[in-house]
Image (cartoon, rainbow, N blue to C red):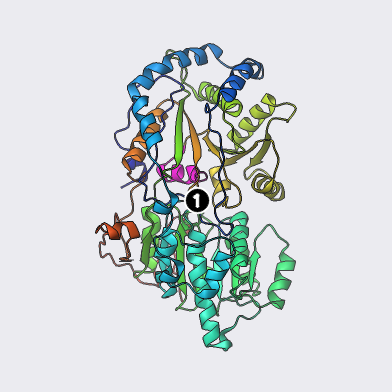
Amino acid sequence: MDRVMAFRALSRGSFPALTHALAYGAPLKCTPALICLRGLAGYQKTTAFSSRKAVSMAASKSERSAKFFRDWDDSSISRNRQRGSAVKKMENPAVLDRVLKNVQIDPMTYFYSQKEFQEIGASDEGIKALEAFGIKRPSKIQAMAHRVLSAGHTAIIADQTGSGKTLAYLLPLVERLRAEEVADPGCRARPGAPRMLVLAPTAELAAQVHLVAKGLSATCPLRSMCVTGSADFKQQVRLLKENPVDLLIATPGRVANLLEREVLTLEALRAAVLDEVDVLFLDESFDLGAVGAGAPRATQFVFVTATLPGEVADQVAGEFPDVKQVIGPGLHKVSPNLEQVIIDCSGPEGEKKTEETGFAHKRAALAQLMLTVRAHRTLVFCNTIENCRKVENALRRLDKRGDKHILLPYHNAIEPQKRGEHLRTFMRSNSLNPMVLICTDRASRGMDFEQAEVDHVVLFDFPRDAAEYVRRVGRTARAGRKGRVTALVFGRQLGLAREIIRLNRSGERLAELPSKSGSKDNQQDDDERMNGRRHAGRRSTGRQGSGRGGGSARGRGGRKPVRR
């Protein structure tokens, strides 16, 4: 079933503008956030319209803000506000408010496993490294994946954005390498011959994985290195030739260059991880063949993803018929601590609906959000680089002196060095001024905000499919904290957005899970085992692939053998 078809029974009616539909997104058991080496920080946020000061500030500034946008249709905005009450009555907001106020969500019930690290088989060295950073209990996906990966199985690790997948694969694989080294000192790493390889689609994600690996190495002796296209190639070559490496974290292009120049060999490889494999497989230039051809046949492959499209699962199962699928409880769901707001930017009835008028109304709504929603870090998602530039220009006109917001564009038209500076500023700056990162889907994929709490996500352009919606909103409400997402919708997108809210309230997945190809891990989530139920979707079709020699692992499904 196509992922978009998960949004069924879409409404195509005409609905008043500026409608706020708020609801929690998933059952209490679903995993909403990433457990990181810095532990859980306290979360403080004032949501929009939560204080009289915020409302009065918005009212006083609305007149001034209109001056910066001469082509705004102020009369339509006013009319839309007056009509909003009718829709609120139709949505029965009083009932929703009671639900939101009465539901108390405890991260311990849906994010963390009921097991301790000792119970899942973590080593004393690994536990000490995690405790040093305040991590005392595994997340659910970490508990589910540890046994499978420690046993050396090739596996798909799939759970929602921010569920703790990085540690879910790093901890057991690093412990396995360490145990092998203790048992046989002769298997220690050599220069240019890593024992474990992690491929990441972006340099930013590779750097973040490297930070986590270095945290683990505090008590688990581990020599790691990160090589990406954003750093000097000659220096990377020199470091690889001179230093033994247990764990190499890299982007695919840089690994291909190193293999071609015979600076890197994979003959000692014990495990290979493809992080964000769904993103990698969408890249036409990505080819796993070089890695598969250079790695020993016994190499353990791990495919990590926040969404699991059917074509990705089929490609992996075709190459590895016995692959284990470890599906987290939050896959294709959003955080239950997420406040979702929909704003209809279709304009008044009778107005001609065009992309230009839709953009103008969304721009006006975004300006109001910047004035009314108090958020220290805001992500604004656009579907194209062109719209990113338009949004950036509009917000700069709104704040000509630059004393209200720090605007940080982040897309592929920005030079990599500048883009990296913007991301570091967004994640690490202690500025008192709110920061706004304006980005595209492609540029933002793989970004891990473990050190930066994103308070507000704005969907300036609505996602193209359900999986991308899950990815975008997963940037906030992480690790048991709260967050808000505001979707600026136009025309028929309103029906799609309303269906998302309905699916979230009913606890359904926003995208269908693929048919279960390959071998299915029978492990259950702790809560569901206690209730005597099997994990949702854990059925097996018994489908067998074509064997290790004839699978597909190239771009969008091109057929190429990847194993020798």
Of residues 62 and 306, the one nearer the viewer is 62
Q: Amino acid at mark 1?
A: Ala
Q: Residue at x 38, y 50 (%)?
A: 30
x then y, percent, for residue 77: 51, 16
512 part of magenta stretch: no
Of residues 304 and 64, the one nearer the viewer is 64
x then y, percent, for residue 530: 28, 59
Of residues 315 and 231, the one nearer the viewer is 231
Judge left or right: residue 292 versus residue 247: left
Q: Residue at x 48, y 65 (%)?
A: 169
x then y, percent, for residue 139: 45, 59
Q: In the structure shown, which secondary structural element does the residue marked by tag 1 occupy? A: loop
Judge left or right: residue 478 versus residue 256: left
469 part of magenta stretch: yes
Point out the stretch of residues depicted in magenta.
463-477
- Determine which residue is flagged by label 1: 479
Is residue 299 visible from the viewing direction of this image?
yes
Asked where in the image residue 497 lies, by quadrant, the reply is top left
Judge left or right: residue 384 versus residue 337: right
Label 1 crowd (10 A; few <14 / some 14-19 / many >=20) = many
Judge left or right: residue 509 versus residue 283: left
x then y, percent, for residue 317: 36, 64
